[in-house]
Image (cartoon, rainbow, N blue to C red):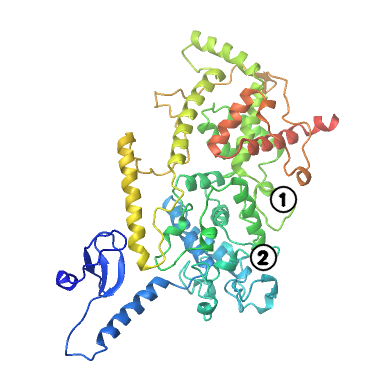
Amino acid sequence: MEEEDTRDYSEPCVQCSVVNWGLTDEGRFYCKTCHNVIERTKEVLTSDVVPNTKIQSISRGFRKRKKIDKGWEWYVCEGFQYILKKQAEALQTLGVCPQMKDEILCNFWRCYLQKSKQAYCTTPVSYTSKALSISDVSTDVDSEPERISIHGLSSFSESDGDLQTENSFGYVSSIGKASARETASVCSGSVDGGSYLLKRKKGNLRMSMPMTLSFCYIALLWLREPVTLSDLLRFVIDGHIPYLNAFQYFPEEMKLYGVDLKIFRVESWPVYEDVHNKMFELATFLDLPRFPAITDSCFLHPNILCIKYLMEANLPDELHNWTCRVVKKINVGETDFLTLDPMNKSARKVKYDVLAAAIIIVVLKLLFLLDDQYEWLHANFAGKRNQKNKEGCLWFDFKKWYKTIKKSVDVEQKKLDEERARCLWKCEKPLFYSAKEKSVVFKKRQMVVNLQRQFGALSGSMQVAEKQSPSSFQLNWAEENTDVNCFHGHILEGVLQEKGNSLTAMNTKYWLCTVKLCNEKICGQLTHYKESDFPQSYQFVLNLFSFLLRVPASLIHEEVCLIEHKLFKTKLHRK
């Protein structure tokens, strides 16, 4: 039947110059070779209908398709809401408490929408051409109906009319959309995308892709989940949590183009300090109360995190006694110090994972000095002793540990570099903005996939294996693993001596990373790190934890300097 309807039309396709026509469901001609749709339609000849039946039928088809092509009228905050929902679901898949999504994160997001006047208020802000400046919008709290309270977050399970009336992370129903068609931006798919990036009033937080991770981390911190910020960012980079091209998970009806791509498309991985700082800004903006206390039984306590990083760095278990002594000496294990309190402006912004890594480095400096001399002299002595006495506990050999760690880290670093090189920054899901473009875009995408497969076969590259479930540990040092040396059970003989009823370090010297800290307001940071100014052993240990946490070495170095100034505060004051 289709061949009979198209055999009289012998014009070649304007794109591929082939005569091979078919009919769409709406009766339009399309090329079967390149899927190009043209304006020609099927002729309907019948005497049983009035003359304009053909036109009416085609007109209805056009109107329906046009409505689908245009897509939904949506706001930028709805796009971020959809991404937050996907990120929360990914975290739940990884084992996070279910209430993180439906109660904690959902209520934080609603509070943000209300605080930023985007929803849950009488007069929501419209970031369109009719409302370019947010400063013109009244911020009078009294005008808001039934303000969402965050100060009762400890009892989310209690029934709350406003918060429980709609499903968690449903569409933002409080945004007025009556005039959306009139004010829709012509340079973006969203209603307010064209004006969303305009300058905002000071103190008003604009949503961004890094901010979505700040939302996730603040919810994890509230629940005291065993996930550090470095773990969260690692899961993002490894692809376990949606972030890169997260907009490809939007429904097909949410058209994305123009300025929307600047808002939702990322061209770099999230930065630790950026996400961390935005998290504190967010907590202050939401007027959150003091978070649940972080006690010595919580995963984020430095004593527990030090155990984790000692195991991952393949260091002796005995070092944990020394990390606990340092934590107690400088008072960084106190609940008031560790618990986040947004209302306390003078409180320090604690980086739990970086703090634990820095404590371990300070302990290694206390015992082994890390000056490129003392640790190697002791390693030679420990190596000779272990060769003579192979029975019993082995002494910790810094030199042997260095070689073992370097070999494993180099292998893992190479894998990481290869994965990053293979990373496709361009969206895998083709973006198209009309049904007319759909067939062309999909055909081009299929050509790219075929070329990649052919070049991969020619170059002999292996197929990328499926992603495995992530682990809290990147390096495996199990004693059952005979391929590597495990130093967990080694003892610290040769670097410790008994003094009274306690053990002290035989090494009585210590060198400071910096004698005086910089003024952060003037320099922008407390310390400056230049590798050539420090011993290679110290650089190696610093780079090891930089790899494990995937943060800059300078960030850990700054924390080491802060700990040293607390630890030797009295001596520095005398000088």
Give the residue drawn at x 65%, y 60%. 289
Q: Quadrant of residue 176?
A: bottom right
Q: Quadrant of the N terminus?
A: bottom left
Task: Tell me the CA gap for discs 2 and 1.
Answer: 27 Å
Disc 2 to disc 1: CB gap under 8 Å: no
Q: Position of residue 163 (x, y in %)?
A: 53, 71
Q: Is residue 219 shown to the viewer in this render?
A: yes
Q: Residue furthest top?
A: 388
Picture layout, residue 234 above or below residue 202: above
Crowd class of label 2 (few under 14; some 14 to 19; many from 20; radius 10 Å): some
User: Residue 347 has which mark?
Assistant: 1
Q: Quadrant of residue 42?
A: bottom left
Picture layout, residue 339 above or below residue 532: below
Q: Name the residue type under label 2.
A: Arg
Q: Residue furthest front?
A: 11
Q: Name the residue type under label 1.
A: Ala
Q: Position of residue 513 (x, y in %)?
A: 72, 30
Front-most of residues 450 and 46: 46
Q: Position of residue 323 (x, y in %)?
A: 63, 32
The residue pinned by badge 2 equals: 200
Picture layout, residue 468 above or below residue 429: above
Front-most of residues 497 and 33: 33
Q: Position of residue 373 (x, y in %)?
A: 65, 16
Give the left or right position of residue 268, taking residue 8 as reference: right
